[in-house]
Amino acid sequence: MAKSKKKWVAFRTNATVPAEVIGTEKDQKMQVGEPVLLPADYADHVVHEGFAEKSQAPKKSEPKASGGQSEEEKAEAAKLKAAQDRVDELNAEKTEMSEGDDGWDDMIKKLEEAEADLAALKPAS
């Protein structure tokens, strides 16, 4: 089954999105300026009506660097961050596409490879 396209928006005021729009049991309250992923048609509607503006996917906060990191630890942290950024970028691209779109299979393959690279870099827990 093809997934519907979605877009990121940030509401200009506190707003409530109907449950049937987001596929939940209850309406969901949105906070001012907080990026939210909505079905493309609804996102276009709220932007057109001036209730929201287009937005980017939220950025993950960076971990605080400790002052005692070695150069090797810093390099590993940079590799891990780059791999995570790549996975995030591909996931954002995936939300803009639907299964069956041109390039879907290629994008999924790239995402799977990026996730495998990220998993290989993460420390064992």
Image (cartoon, helix red, strand yellow):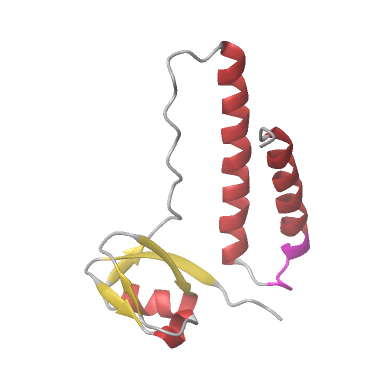
Residue drawn at point x = 69 percent, y = 35 percent: 124
Residue drawn at point x = 70 percent, y = 47 percent: 115
Magenta segment, prevailing SS (helix, strand or loop): loop
Q: Nearer the viewer, residue 58 or 107?
A: 58
Q: Which quadrant of the structure image shows residue 45?
A: bottom left
Q: Is residue 75 above or below residue 86?
A: above
Q: Position of residue 6 (x, y in %)?
A: 52, 71
Residue drawn at point x = 49 percent, y = 76 percent: 39
Q: Position of residue 31 (x, y in %)?
A: 28, 65
Q: Quadrant of the C terminus?
A: top right
**Magenta residues, as a range?**
99-105
Q: Is residue 33 above or below residue 38?
A: above
Q: Farthest front residue?
A: 125
Q: Is residue 65 above or below residue 13?
A: above
Q: Is residue 27 inside the magenta stretch? A: no
Q: Farthest left residue?
A: 13
Q: Nearer the viewer, residue 124 or 102?
A: 124
Q: Is residue 38 left or right of residue 100?
A: left
Q: Position of residue 27 (x, y in %)?
A: 36, 82
Q: Is residue 90 left or right of residue 28?
A: right
Q: Is residue 54 left or right of residue 83?
A: left
Q: Quadrant of the N terminus?
A: bottom right
Q: Nearer the viewer, residue 42 or 121?
A: 121
Q: Is residue 24 above or below residue 100?
A: below
Residue drawn at point x = 58 percent, y = 49 percent: 89
Q: Which quadrant of the structure image shows residue 108?
A: bottom right
